[in-house]
């Protein structure tokens, strides 16, 4: 058995809707919460040798999981929370909550992650998708990233060895972030904390935080806003099944209580086709979708 002798929590037929912020998904065959990055690497390598699919997820804040569930082993990194503070630097494991890290840095008077105070994902996920908000993003603060690669090896990369762009990191689809080192700048503590509070207020006002969602569904096209295009096309408030385009922000799809992945996918497809037909713009998904078709080529590697 792949997990024989491994420390940490193991669950069978575990509801995936408990592992993502959309609250959607069928049962996972096996879910394992590794306690260390070494545990994660061992299980990954054992599963590869046994040709058992592995799915790696963090806090599930940017992820749609399938109604059919997931075969094989789902690794959840939320127990990987080791952290070491240095001189305006921090070494932190992938499962640490980005919002908590932002707040803790702000309390120290360290500037750099003010934009991230309201982002619900993990540090690993933030690095993998170059998370950003309020005009900031995480890439400029990265010193190095240690990653688990698809062949089971763990390697540390310096910032210069990585490529980042809007909601993009060159590791995506190739490796999983194990830990990262981030740099901060000295700042005024009260000003930093005030900016964070303002960012949080803006999120409450402008985003449907009261209902399960996965953040922005589509990437903003160059020079435009996905939310503006979707609203202009008349999709605000429209539903398919239990999935609804938010009345508050058109680039959010909310779970009204009984949404299925198929509802979300149908709504995404309909919106995409309509926006392209009306404005000639093809919207790109920002959220990731897991399904069995992604097993080929180690595409089960993810960050979200």
Image: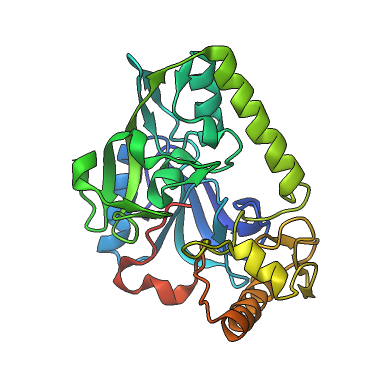
- On the picture, is 67 further left or further right than 256? left
Q: Is residue 172 above or below residue 130?
A: below
Please provide percent x and percent y for residue 36.
37, 35
Q: Please identify the quarter of the rendering in which residue 293 is found.
A: bottom left
Give above or below for 277 relative to 201.
below
- Looking at the image, which is closer to me, 232 or 161? 232
Residue at the extreme front of the image, as rendered: 223
Whether residue 227 is visible: yes
**Relative depth, front residue between 8 and 18:** 18
Q: Nearer the viewer, residue 177 or 1?
A: 177
Q: Quadrant of the N terminus?
A: bottom left
Residue at position x 60%, y 20% from top? 193
Residue 260 seen by the camera? no
The location of residue 261, given as percent across then percent down, is 64, 70
Residue displayed at 70% across by 63% down: 250
Examine the rendered structure and indicate whether residue 14 appears above or below residue 267.
Answer: above
Q: Position of residue 258 (x, y in %)?
A: 78, 65
Which quadrant of the figure has residue 38?
Answer: top left
* Image label count: 0
| Residue 208 on image: x %, y % | 75, 51
Within the image, what quadrant is residue 167 found in? bottom left
Q: Residue at x 34, y 57 (%)?
A: 172
């Amino acid at each position: 058995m792949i997990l024989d002798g491994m420390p940490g929590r193991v669950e069978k037929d575990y509801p995936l809707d408990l592992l993502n912020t959309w609250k959607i998904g069928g049962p996972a065959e096996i879910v394992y919460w590794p306690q260390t990055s070494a545990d994660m690497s061992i299980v990954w390598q054992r599963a590869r040798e046994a040709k058992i699919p592995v799915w790696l997820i963090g806090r599930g804040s940017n992820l749609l999981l399938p109604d059919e569930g997931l075969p094989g082993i789902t690794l959840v990194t939320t127990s990987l929370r080791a952290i070491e503070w240095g001189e305006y630097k921090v070494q932190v494991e992938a499962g640490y909550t980005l919002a908590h890290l932002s707040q803790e840095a702000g309390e120290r008077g360290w500037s750099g992650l003010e934009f991230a105070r309201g982002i619900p994902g993990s540090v690993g996920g933030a690095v993998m998708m170059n998370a950003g908000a309020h005009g900031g993003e995480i890439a400029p603060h990265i010193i190095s990233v240690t990653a688990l690669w698809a062949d089971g090896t763990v390697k540390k990369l310096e910032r210069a060895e990585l490529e980042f762009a809007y909601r993009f990191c060159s590791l995506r689809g190739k490796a999983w972030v194990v830990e990262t080192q981030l740099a901060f700048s000295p700042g005024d503590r009260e000003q930093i904390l005030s900016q964070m509070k303002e960012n949080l207020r803006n999120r409450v006002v402008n985003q449907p935080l009261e209902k399960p969602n996965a953040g922005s569904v589509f990437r903003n096209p160059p020079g435009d806003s996905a939310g503006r295009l979707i609203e202009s096309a008349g999709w605000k408030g429209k539903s398919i099944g239990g999935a609804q385009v938010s009345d508050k922000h058109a680039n959010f799809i909310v779970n009204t209580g009984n949404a299925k992945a198929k509802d979300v996918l149908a709504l995404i497809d309909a919106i995409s086709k309509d926006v392209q037909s009306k404005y000639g713009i093809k919207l790109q998904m920002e959220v990731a979708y897991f399904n069995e078709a992604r097993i080929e080529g180690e595409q089960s590697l993810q960050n979200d």
